[in-house]
Image: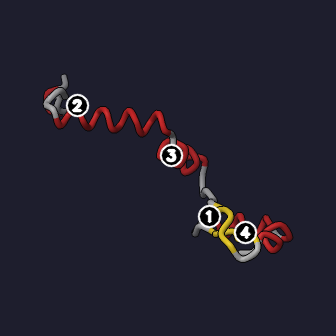
């Protein structure tokens, strides 16, 4: 969608973005993406999935498990 179109009717595009990502173009070239959220939980999930520190910790935990330095759920009291 052209930036000018999005600016003219942002509310409509926000509603559309709840079900699909909308690529915003400037002078015919991709310039950004509009992503909508159906709920606050969706927003929190998105933030976690894209937070560098969270992703780093997940990677470290996976490495630890692969190296045998983890505790299985079955072994927890």
Q: On the image, numbered disc 2 is attached to which residue?
A: 64
Q: Dividing the picture into quarters, in which one does residue 3 lie? A: bottom right
Q: CA distance from mark 3 to mark 1?
A: 18 Å
Q: Is residue 55 above or below residue 35?
A: above
Circle 1 or circle 2, nearest the eye = 2
Q: Percent position (x, y) of residue 10?
A: 79, 65
* Residue 13's disc number: 4
Say whether disc 4 or disc 3 marks the residue closer to the N-terminus.
4
**Label 2 residue SS:** helix
User: Tag 2 or tag 1, which sits nearer the N-term?
Assistant: 1
User: How far apart are the two marked residues, 2 and 4, measured between alpha carbons?
Assistant: 43 Å
Residue carrying label 1: 18
Q: Residue at x 78, y 65 (%)?
A: 11
Q: Position of residue 34 (x, y in %)?
A: 66, 62
From the image, tell me which residue sits under label 3. 50
Residue most extreme to the right: 8
Residue 74 is left or right of residue 45, and the answer is left
Of the two numbered discs 3 and 1 on the same chain, state the one appearing first in sequence: 1
Q: CA distance from mark 4 to mark 3?
A: 23 Å
């Amino acid at each position: 969608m052209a930036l000018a179109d999005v600016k003219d009717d942002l509310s409509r595009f926000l509603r559309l973005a709840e079900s699909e990502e909308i690529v915003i173009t400037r002078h015919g070239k991709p310039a950004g993406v509009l992503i909508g959220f159906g709920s606050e939980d969706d927003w929190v999930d998105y933030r976690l999935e894209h937070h560098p520190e969270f992703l780093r910790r997940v990677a470290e935990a996976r490495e630890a498990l692969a190296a045998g330095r983890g505790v299985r759920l079955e072994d927890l009291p």
